[in-house]
């Protein structure tokens, strides 16, 4: 890749990749680090005509996040689904989620189990097709549909509370 194509590559995917990565780790610095590493891997290994770049980047980010958890002894003792959620009123979320209703919905989404949260964010916020989500999460298309259905059901109950 030349300098212009690297810049276009980053500009095209950075916002969506950051939103997804931040939804995984809920830490601005770590999300930026994971995103930076994913883009570096993309620049080094993807050719210009690679299909499904966005899905590939999401999969790399998810794998880097899992690797981080495994490598970090403190976090490896914690169930991924029970990681404490930071205050979601941070400036970064306010920039990414533009109104109060969306912010409230996002706050409810991040309390869901990790797999449900991943599926919802990829599908609704980042508009990734279910087939690509299945590739990213390494599950079947039917499992993605089930996750989204159950996540919506859980989210509806949380919103009614």
Image: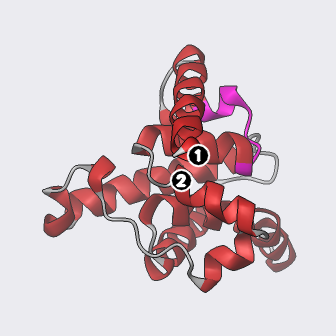
Q: Is residue 148 magenta?
A: no
Residue 73 image position (x, y, % from top left): 13, 66
Residue 45 image position (x, y, % from top left): 60, 56
In the displayed structure, does residue 118 sit left or right of residue 92?
A: left
**Residue farthest along the front direction in this orientation:** 161
In the displayed structure, does residue 11 sit left or right of residue 122?
A: right
Q: At 53% across and 72% down in the image, what residue appears?
A: 88
Residue 52 image position (x, y, % from top left): 73, 41
Instruction: Bin the neighbour count of mark 2 within 10 Å (Cα to Cα): few under 14, some 14-19, many 20 and up.
Output: some
Question: Height in image: 135 above or below 43?
Answer: above
Report the front residue among 143 and 50.
143
- Say which label, 2 or 1, has the lower sequence index: 2
Label 2 to label 1, Cα distance in Å? 7 Å
Callout 1: SS:
helix
Q: At 56% across and 82% down in the image, what residue appears?
A: 90
Question: Height in image: 87 above or below 133?
Answer: below
Label disc, if present, on residue 148 of the rendered structure: none
Callout 2: SS:
helix
Q: How is the image coloured?
A: secondary structure
Question: Height in image: 138 above or below 8?
Answer: above
Q: At 43% across and 65% down in the image, what residue appears?
A: 25
Identify the residue under disc 2: 108
Report the front residue among 131 and 155.
155
Residue 21 image position (x, y, % from top left): 54, 62
Specify the segment rendered in magenta. 125-133
Mark 2–mark 1 CB contact (< 8 Å): yes
Residue 112 visible here: yes
Q: Is residue 132 magenta?
A: yes
**Residue farthest along the top direction in this orientation:** 142
In the displayed structure, does residue 98 sit left or right of residue 138?
A: right
Label disc, if present, on residue 159 of the rendered structure: 1
Q: At 82% across and 46% down in the image, what residue appears?
A: 49
């Amino acid at each position: 890749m030349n300098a212009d194509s690297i810049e276009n590559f980053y500009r095209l995917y950075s916002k969506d990749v950051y939103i997804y990565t931040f939804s995984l780790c809920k830490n601005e610095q770590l999300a930026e680090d994971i995103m930076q590493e994913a883009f570096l891997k993309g620049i080094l290994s993807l050719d210009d005509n690679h299909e499904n770049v966005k899905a590939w980047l999401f999969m790399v980010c998810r794998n880097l996040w899992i690797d981080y958890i495994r490598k970090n002894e403190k976090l490896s003792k914690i169930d991924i689904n029970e990681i404490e959620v930071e205050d979601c009123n941070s400036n970064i979320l306010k920039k990414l989620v533009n109104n109060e209703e969306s912010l409230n919905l996002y706050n409810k989404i991040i309390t869901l189990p990790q797999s449900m949260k991943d599926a919802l964010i990829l599908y609704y916020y980042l508009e990734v097709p279910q087939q690509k989500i299945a590739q990213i999460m390494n599950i079947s298309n039917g499992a993605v549909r089930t996750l989204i259905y159950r996540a919506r059901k859980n989210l509806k109950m949380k919103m009614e509370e």
